[in-house]
Image (cartoon, rainbow, N blue to C red):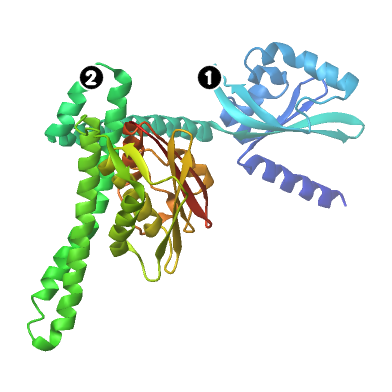
Amino acid sequence: MGNELEDLALRLQGIIETAIDGIITIDDKGIVETVNNSAAVKFGYDPAEIVGNNIKMLMPEPYHSEHDGYLHRYNSTKKPKIIGIGREVTGRTKHGEHFPFRLAVSEVILNDRVIFTGIIHDLSDVKNAEIKLRQLNNELEKKVEARTNELELAINRLLLTNKKLEDRETALNSALEKEKELNELKSRFVSMASHEFRTPLSTIMSSASLISKYVEESQNEKREKHVKRIKSAVVNLTGILNDFLSLSKIEEGMVNVQIVNVAIPSLCELVIDEVKGLQKKGQFVEHHSDENCDFLKTDERILKNVLFNLLSNSIKYSKENGKIICSVQKYSEGLLFRIQDFGIGIPKEEQKYLFDRFFRATNVENIQGTGLGLQIVQRYVELLKGEISFESEEGVGTTFTVKIPNLG
């Protein structure tokens, strides 16, 4: 039996001595009884220099001065601060250097004696890695910031080649907020233009290339298909350019309001007839007009543009076989126009941006557009001293209400 216990003790001692983590035992007074080789190496001592001394020799201040008091309080109250809990602490080497480690302390009662065993897991490599990671993150943030600044400068140089935008920027230099607004407008213009121009131009290029291959009379149908694709792409490009020209004229004060007595029923019929070419299969516009809505003193051309834009939007964002309602009512100061569709609607959280330039709702999918139409409509309505509002529900439809007063 004695031999077995001896063998067991030797094996246990061998395990402790070869453990990677440091292992130290102390008595209830804090005097070191055993220390394995790993712990001695971490603290820079020979084991014999530690055994028999108070454990606080391995602690920096203020822990060095406080440890005896802590151990006394624990022996009296049994309320642990580290024992049985474990925490990250700092050790002090023989040469006065400090290093971090994870300390787990357990209490053991052996032959009616209380001893404490501490397991020491060195965190130096982990802390060094964290420091290096923070340094790398800081360097990366600086590089990202530098690259972002370089990209912004490159975009601004490209935009400055556009003389019209240069003139606009010069006019707004007197106000910081206006300058910020222009810079944002430029960035969004580049993004939108690169997307909206690329698609129709690619269509024109591919269709033009294919047409040249269809030389036989029997291939007339295929040729006609690609001719239609080219025409459609040109119409889209023309629409984009018209939006930009319209907004540019408004902002430059080049739109003059000419007040005439406008025949409203005739104007509505004209606009409804013009949008027929935009209608999808089965779509139709239903027109209602109350009594005493025959005439309105306003600018006929601008009002026509407002109605055409709103109706074309309703057609664009409605499905086939859908109905669009155009109604006219009288109100105290003039006439009220309502354009109602039952199309895709506008997401509630995005409705506040509807009249912002270049804004396009997330649910428009592949429907083409510049995001300028409603900005133009709003500016036109303002020129006519009117008001525009809307109600919309995604998947149900949208109703625009435009109030235009008599200007005569």
Percent x, y for residue 135?
41, 29
Pointer 2 residue = 173
Query: Badge 2: few (under 14), some or many (20 or more) residues near its Cα, within 10 Å?
Result: few
Q: Which mark is residue 97?
A: 1
Image-quadrant location for residue 63 = top right
Mark 1 residue type: Glu
Secondary element at tag 1: loop
Residue 10, position as x, y percentages in the image? 74, 45
Residue lying farthest bottom? 218
Q: CA distance from mark 2 to mark 1?
A: 59 Å
Decide if residue 351 is on the left or right side of residue 42.
Answer: left
Using the rendered image of the protein, determine whether residue 368 is visible from the camera's viewpoint: no
Counting labels gives 2
Left or right, 281 with respect to 73, comes to: left
Measuring 27% from the left and 30% from the top, which residue is drawn there? Answer: 183
Residue drawn at point x = 23 percent, y = 41 percent: 246
Residue that protrudes farthest toward the front in the picture: 292
In this rendering, is residue 387 above or below 328?
A: above
Q: Residues within 10 Å of mark 1 (few under 14, many from 20)?
A: few
Q: Point out the image quarter for the C terminus.
A: top left
Spot occupied by residue 88 in the image (x, y as percentages of width and height): 64, 29
Q: Amino acid at mark 2?
A: Asn
User: Which structural element holds mark 2?
Assistant: loop
Pair 2/1: label in front: 2
Q: Residue furthest right?
A: 112
